[in-house]
Amino acid sequence: MSDETTDLTFTDGASAFKYSCQCLDCSVEPKKPLPALVLDAREHFGQATPTKMNDDGTQTVVLRVPSPDGGFVVLARTAGKDEPELAGGELVAWMPLLYNEDLAKETDEAGFGWVGVIMGTLKPVLRKGGWLGDVRYGK
């Protein structure tokens, strides 16, 4: 675990995510925010664009949520509308809301049934046990 008085600064979202998987409590519980890594949907789901811009101004993206075994994939929507477009490799604050059994049956990917929202982007800096916020969505 990190020293609570020292900042840990990572070179990018991927290295911060890896640290989260290896060193932090990544248990998923409703309304317990976690850092998550934005993945390029073109690579993971064959989508035409890295993120999907929805008609209502929100975005739907593929995230990797941290876990001790390297993380699991979920789909998530941004809480805010008309926010900066997310890109693969960005670290975001993901708020799990509930586990949907029917959604979980769609794939054999462990954890895919978790439904949550992206509250904003995070800087790859861990300060006093928490990630530094960057752009907050749904202001």
Image (spheres, rainbow, N blue to C red):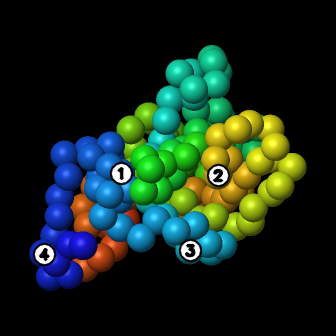
Question: What amino acid is labelled 3 in the image?
Answer: Lys
- Image mark for residue 32: 3
Where's residue 12, x and y in %?
26, 44
Distance in Å between CA atoms under marks 2 and 3: 15 Å
Describe residue 124's horizontal placement relative to residue 41 as left or right: left
Q: Earlier in the sequence, mark 2 or mark 4?
A: 4
Reading the image, the residue beneath label 4 is: 6
Mark 4 and mark 3 residues within 8 Å of each other at the beta carbon = no
Residue 32 occupies which quadrant of the picture?
bottom right
**Amino acid at circle 1:** Phe
Give amino acid for label 4.
Thr
Instruction: Report how far apart the C-alphas of labels 1 and 2 lie in the structure.
Output: 17 Å
Mark 1 lies on residue: 17
Towards the viewer: 54 or 73 = 73
In the drawing, does residue 59 fall left or right of residue 94?
Answer: right
Depth order, front residue of 112/121: 112
Q: CA distance from mark 4 to mark 1?
A: 18 Å
Secondary element type, mark 3: loop
Q: Is residue 44 visible?
A: yes
CA distance separating discs 4 and 3: 23 Å
Per the rendering, the mark at residue 111 is: 2
Who's the residue at 70% across and 67% down the image?
97
Q: Does residue 61 appear to the left or right of 102 in the view shown?
A: left
